[in-house]
Amino acid sequence: MTDDAHGNRSGGERPGDPHERRRELAAQRLDEAGAAGLVAFPSRNLQYLTGFAEEPGERHFFLVVPAASAADPEPALLAPALFETQVREATTVGEVRTWSDGDNPVAATRELLADRGLDSGRLLVDDTMWARFSQDLRAAAPDAAWGLASEALADLRVRKDDAELAALREAAAVADAVVGDLRELGADAVGMTEAALADRIAERLAERGGRGVSFETVVAAGENGAKPHHGHGDREIRAGEPVVLDFGTRVDGYPSDQTRTLVFDGEPAEAYAEVHEVVREAQAAGVEAVGPGVPASAVDRAAREVIEAAGYGDAFVHRTGHGVGLDVHEEPYLVAGNDRPLEPGMVCSVEPGIYLDGRFGCRIEDLVVVTEDGCERLNRTDRGWE
């Protein structure tokens, strides 16, 4: 089995294909939501349901999933003809219809919806669908009512299946290995720019088996560390200063996301050593709080109480964590006011931080999986600054 240009596993029909199971579950959820069907376009939802990853473009590309109770419940893909070979190799969707440049894609969409009995009733469309395509769907099914696909998919995507967890574990292991590579740089990192170190991280992620970066790499040296989403620039790394390193890669489409704050040469200032220990304790308290039935807000509170008790409450300026799946940021959000109970299979970050303007910042982040009796850390590297 090989990877295609989009990072999909190819190999035709596969026994026990998780995407087929997800389509079946989605079809059941459509009945529960009182919807006749679902239409996805190139997005994380389409990737979740088919395994095929593609960026939105100018051409009409739809996945149609009828409700389980439909007269014809078989899902179907409508794709531009130039994608046909890739789609057939990368997915287990039984019916793939194509249209060619010069054809009328709205007519092809109308025909597919009518064949599946979806030219009326309530249809759920991808939450991120571009307006031009949603308008063309309305033209193809003028008698339909409309809702959002998240009604059927949100509760499925928030709990990861075995295939998703395997990919997330592998992606986390790649990121952990690169943290080890960075620690080995030691004094050699001094004098490098943030941008050069970000490039080094991307290279090492690829060499370790990742595919690209899962978001813009954060390399924030010294005072730049006080900006939680600094990114990276031309600032040179100096001896004895903290550098916030937040990065990840993708494996089978699933991302890693971890943060360590390292000092590459010498000892940091005493003030930083104190802050780092507070953040380390807060992160440990947050992880300890994760478990089935625990409100998401309770994890935020557990980490925040440690930082507030140390006198840095005003310097912790963001939520404690977020869910991670095909999207790097998704439900559940570990934030005050979100009392949604955590459930086994949910994956989230735990990443408290302290940010002192003009001086430095510190953040420590691991991904964790909620289990039946607590949680499993996906990131295992040391959380110290050395």
Image (cartoon, rainbow, N blue to C red):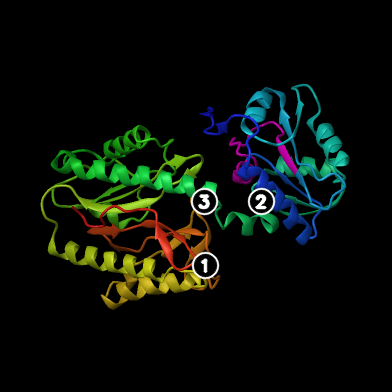
Give coordinates of residue 96: x percent, y percent: 74, 31
Q: What numbered label is drawn on residue 342?
A: 1
| SS assignment at label 2 | loop
Q: What residue would you read off at disc 2?
A: 127
Number of dots carrying numbers: 3
- Neighbour class for label 3 at 10 Å: few (<14), some, many (≥20)? many
Q: Kindly identify the residue that appears in the image at 55 percent across and 54 percent down.
A: 160
For the question of whether residue 178 can be seen, the reply is: yes
Work out how far the residue at label 2 is from the one at label 3, CA to CA, in angstroms: 16 Å
- Please report contact status of discs 2 and 3: CB closer than 8 Å, yes or no: no
| SS assignment at label 1 | loop
Task: Tell me the kind of residue under disc 3.
Answer: Gly
Give coordinates of residue 274: x percent, y percent: 19, 67
Locate residue 156: give its quadrant: bottom right
Work out how far the residue at label 1 is from the one at label 2, CA to CA, in angstroms: 24 Å
- Neighbour class for label 1 at 10 Å: few (<14), some, many (≥20)? many
- Please report contact status of discs 3 and 1: CB closer than 8 Å, yes or no: no
Locate residue 302: give its quadrant: bottom left
Badge nearest the viewer, 1 or 2: 1
Give coordinates of residue 177: x percent, y percent: 30, 43
Asked if the magenta segment contains residue 132, the reply would be no
- Neighbour class for label 2 at 10 Å: few (<14), some, many (≥20)? some
Q: Kindly identify the residue that appears in the image at 70 percent across and 52 percent down.
A: 26
Locate residue 353: give its quadrant: bottom left
| SS assignment at label 3 | loop
Which sits earlier in the primary sequence, circle 3 or circle 1?
3
Range of magenta residues: 43-64
Front residue of 352/289: it is 289
Badge nearest the viewer, 2 or 3: 3
Q: What residue would you read off at disc 3?
A: 325
Which sits earlier in the primary sequence, circle 2 or circle 3?
2
